[in-house]
Amino acid sequence: MTPDDQSRNHMFPARHRDAKPGVNIVANWAVIGIFLILLFSFFAQARDFLMPVTLAVLLFFVFSPFRRLMQRLGLGASAAAAIVSLALVVAVAGIGVVVSGPVNRLIEDAPQISTRLEQRFTDLRSNFRGLERAAEKLDEITGAGTDDGEDTATAVAPAATLTGTLSNPAAQDQPDQQINVQVTTAPETSALVSLMNLGPALLSQIVFTLFLLFFLISSGDLLYLKIVQSFDTMRDKRAAYMALREIEDRLGTYLGAITLINACLGLSVGLTMWAWGMPSPILFGLAAFLLNYIPYLGSVGGVVIATLVALFVFDDLVTPLMVGGSYLFLTAFEGQLITPYFVSRRLQLNTVVVFLTVALWAWLWSALGMIIAVPLLVVIRVLAEHIPGLNKFGNLLAGETPPALEDDDEETAPAPAAPAATKG
């Protein structure tokens, strides 16, 4: 054995033959499980910092094509970043102005709305009063045999006092005593106070997101360059650059198509609510536009909100159901026909994985987590397609119909020979 072989064996010792592969596999999966637990704990604990950072990075990928277009037209990256940031500020301010009036009226009328809804649910329960009366009659029939015995036992049995002595309740004839009871209740926290407490934190996260997005866009391709330079071989550098450009392309295509579809849905919902005579149809349209960024759960929330408001507005029970049904019809039509037609097949994702991802990020990051769950899933799928070891995981995330499974034996088995023809 040469000295080089001895040195190589010393640096990379061979694995013993008595090592058990099963134990190593279990240990590797245990380490992966511990890492995932720590990772999700980190996401939950650092949510106030990670939420605006993640949103800014996703928006950077979305607006990178616009920045390149501005650079080709002669504008610098800083000018493109200023245009994007100003447009987002105007959009957020416009949404705030549109929402402020109806939300203030909603907060002021919250007690009346609560009382009205309780009255409507009471009326709804009164429609089932016949079933309750039948149950009461059944209780009277089953308990009629024991009522007399219980009354007699109650009349004869002495009553126990607080001092532990027994006395006859019929013999007690004492005047009523007045007891003063003072009840101290905690001050109620109104919805307006809760929103005011939430406002500064939300505003600070929005400002942080806009500033970080401005710096990312104004830096141009610096982020891409630093990521590509972190790889050694030219093949890996090219693969990393292609993955970044594909993330940019797919995110832009997905969010652009979804935004256009949501705008059309919001317009349709607003017109429908106006046709039904619902209050603040613009607010309903805006809510439908924003809620539809949340897959599945957003449409359910919109239907519930529309139905509850209709219960407060209309006196009958049929009209609120029709209002909720019309909202459900529009969202179902959009989800089953419009979105699958306009969104490319390469952007379609596994429905079960999407639902679980939305639920996971809702648990971690609340409402914003539900909004960015699908864009993050798009990024993960692109990375899985470009990393050789994660190709099977990327196939799990895909939404295309898989090919039919065939047995290898059936594919390789030779066709049976035709029977020889016999002469008659």
Image (spheres, grey):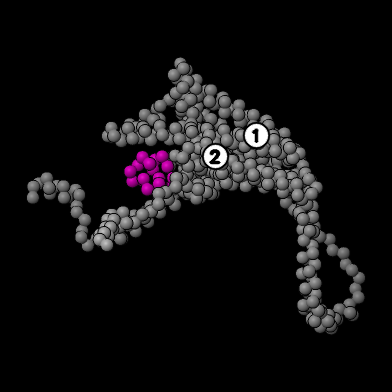
From this viewpoint, is residue 326 visible?
yes
Instruction: Give the mark nearest the N terminus, 1 or 2.
Output: 1
Q: Which mark is in front, 1 or 2?
A: 2
Please name whichever residue, 263 or 77, is drawn nearer the observer in this view of the structure. Answer: 263
Q: Is residue 227 magenta?
A: no
Query: Which residues fall within the magenta stretch?
Result: 381-398
| Residue 201 vertical placement versus 188 (above, below) | above
Task: Give percent across and percent down for residue 32.
Answer: 38, 52
Residue ID for mark 1: 267
* Left-right relation of 45 to 1: right
Q: Amino acid at mark 1?
A: Leu
Identity of the residue furthest to the top in this view: 74
Location of residue 298 by image quarter = top right
Name the residue at 34% across, 56% down: 407
Residue drawn 77% across the image and 77% down it: 142
Picture disc at residue 331: none
Kind of residue sitting beneath label 2: Thr
Across and down, in percent, residue 180 comes to 84, 61
Q: Quadrant of residue 26?
A: bottom left
Which sits in the foreground, 49 or 181?
A: 49
Callout 1: SS:
helix
- Tell me which secondary structure the magenta stretch mostly adopts: helix
Q: To which residue does mark 2 refer?
A: 339
Q: Residue at x 70, y 38 (%)?
A: 272
